[in-house]
Image: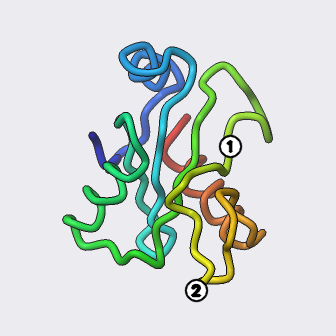
Amino acid sequence: MLILNQPISRDELKSIAANTFGDMVKAVADVRRGLIAIDADLHADLERYLLENGSMQQDLWGFNLWVDEQGEDFIEFDSLINIRAWQGNPSRDVLDPEVRSAIAGIVNKFIL
């Protein structure tokens, strides 16, 4: 698991994917702190890692990065950790457009 503190290239992301799912990397973003954690078998593992490193539950959102895709197909806003009725998100999908936009901004900052 890795919390990105500097940008990585698509080629580096593809190398990470090759060691796990082949064409996809699981990721969790902290939308308040502007962080992204990658490289685990489960979003829950990345969530725990960020919580241990100062993040707050309500700020964490899981998603997948499809390394061979571009544009809207690159980010898939799907994770079990996103199911939070108490936060207005009763789905695995990230429903709030502002949260989606924040995640996309963080991804664009760290994945070149």
Residue 105 or residue 29, whichever sits in front: 29
Q: Residues within 10 Å of mark 2 (few under 14, many from 20)?
A: few
SS label for mark 1: strand
Q: Where's the N terminus, which quadrant?
A: top left
State the image coordinates of residue 83 (x, y, percent, origin top left).
59, 66
Amino acid type assigned to the residue bearing label 1 in the image: Glu
Could you give the CA–CA distance between mark 2 and mark 1, rounded to whole angstroms? 22 Å
Residue 111 x, y percent position in the rendering: 52, 38
**Tag 2 secondary structure:** helix
Point out the image quarter for the C terminus.
top right
Residue 63 horizontal side relative to residue 77, left or right: left
> Residue 86 got which mark?
2
Q: Earlier in the sequence, mark 2 or mark 1?
A: 1
Residue 93 vertical placement versus 96 (above, below): above
2 vs 1, front mark: 2
Find residue 86 and report its horizontal and vertical position in percent.
Answer: 58, 86
In the picture, residue 35 is in which quadrant? bottom left
Dot 1, how many residues are within 10 Å of its Cα: few (below 14), some (14-19), or many (20+)?
some
Q: Amino acid at mark 2?
A: Trp
| Residue 28 horizontal/vertical position (percent) | 46, 53
Residue for badge 1: 76
